[in-house]
Amino acid sequence: MTQPPVSVVVVSKGRPRSLRRTLTAVSQQAYPEFEIIVVTDDDGVDAVGFLEFGHQIKLVSFDEDNISTARNQGIAAAAGEIVAFIDDDAVPETGWLWHLTAPFSEAEVAAAGGYVRGRNGITFQWRARSVNSAAEYDDIAISGDKPVVMTPAKGRAIKTEGTNMAFRRDVIAEMGGFDPAFEFYLDETDVNMRLADQGAATAIVPLAEVHHGFFESARRTARRAPRDLAQNGASMAVFLRKHCREADRADVWSAYQRGQRKRLVDYMIKGELMPGDVARLMRGLRKGYAEGLERKITVLERIPRASDGFRAFERQVAGAEIIAGRQWRRAAIRREALASSRAGRIPSVFVFSRTGLFHRVTFHSEGYWEQVGGLFGRSDRAQRLFRITGFRKRLRQEQQRVARQRLLLDESETSAREGKA
């Protein structure tokens, strides 16, 4: 199979440190031909300049609070056949692009979306979902890890998540990209609905994994509690105007408000919000909805092809490496991983303590993956709470668990180093 050239678009605002981490992971993609496009503010531009590979990145300076317009700027700069999107608070597994683009070998596939893991690097935030004209989501049961191509039923769309999705450039550009009326929230869901109206097929790709951190922003705290819901309300109003029957909109909006209030109360119970915050945020939600009812919705124009051509990203990667050991050697193992990364390899670190602690997976901005946890603890949260196993057996199991997503080589081909037990 010929792998098409891909343009990876990262939109970033106000998170330069997180952006550098995202770009480090993107730069390690095991994919033959891709370019990186960053649409960002002045701080983001400076952050890219500090990266050793920053000169290879297409930079688009953009400082407006409109994620749809920013993504359209990325599409305008893209010269690949496929345009992939990832957020600036997320990192992709090494095989992300390889897996995400594979379904595009089928001519009818217009879009693809992968799975998203949460901040512990283990639990999934999103897998496969569909969405209807009320912006209500339903899980889709997918067994196995092979891509599944789906054409949605009338009135529904196959959902792709903004931090892990790809489109044929010709298709998304002809559609006019993302609707700027969605300044934040539901922008990609609107695209999904418009693709569904065309009868276009979307692929769900389980092995195309992204780790999403939900970093702090102007709209939410580091623990995901909302700070402002005005844009959510405005986008909901726009979405219902575009996709929901007028007779149903009032009921849908009422149900949405009830759901948002329940979510806020849950945060209050956990101590993340004060009682007064709930009322304030609900006022903002309703005010935003009223504003969204007045937003101008226009016919979107086709986005022209990039004028400066494809800028292939070139970085020599010397292969994957497994570095493993006991918890008491963690500092030394990290030094080994850092040296390995600087030598051009992509290290996967496994550090086990002699406990039943749950596992966590982290990508470090220095360029290596680290999994820590108890030798007898869960990685997959569906595993038994406690089990007896040996170090080497557990290492082999955890390496196999991520091998296909990360495109790790077989043990006989991988430089594996185990610290003294």
Image (tube, rainbow, N blue to C red):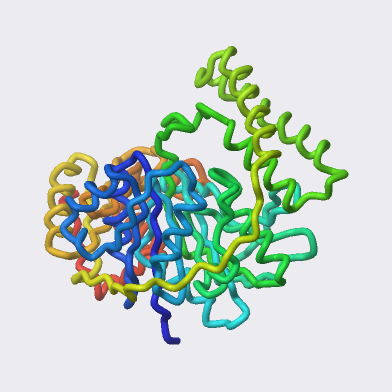
Q: Nearer the viewer, residue 104 or 15?
A: 15
**Horizontal and vertical percent position of residue 59:** 30, 58
Side of 98 where 290 appears, left or right = right
**Horizontal and vertical percent position of residue 402:** 40, 61
Q: Residue at x 29, y 53 (%)?
A: 369
The N terminus, quarter of image: bottom left
Q: Residue at x 64, y 63 (%)?
A: 142
Residue 145 appearing in the image: no
Side of 54 where 29 appears, left or right = right
Q: Residue at x 59, y 18 (%)?
A: 280
Q: Residue at x 59, y 83 (%)?
A: 107
Q: Nearer the viewer, residue 199 or 120?
A: 199
181 to 147, vertically: above or below: above
**Horizontal and vertical percent position of residue 7:** 39, 68
The mark total stands at 0
153 to 61, vertically: above or below: below
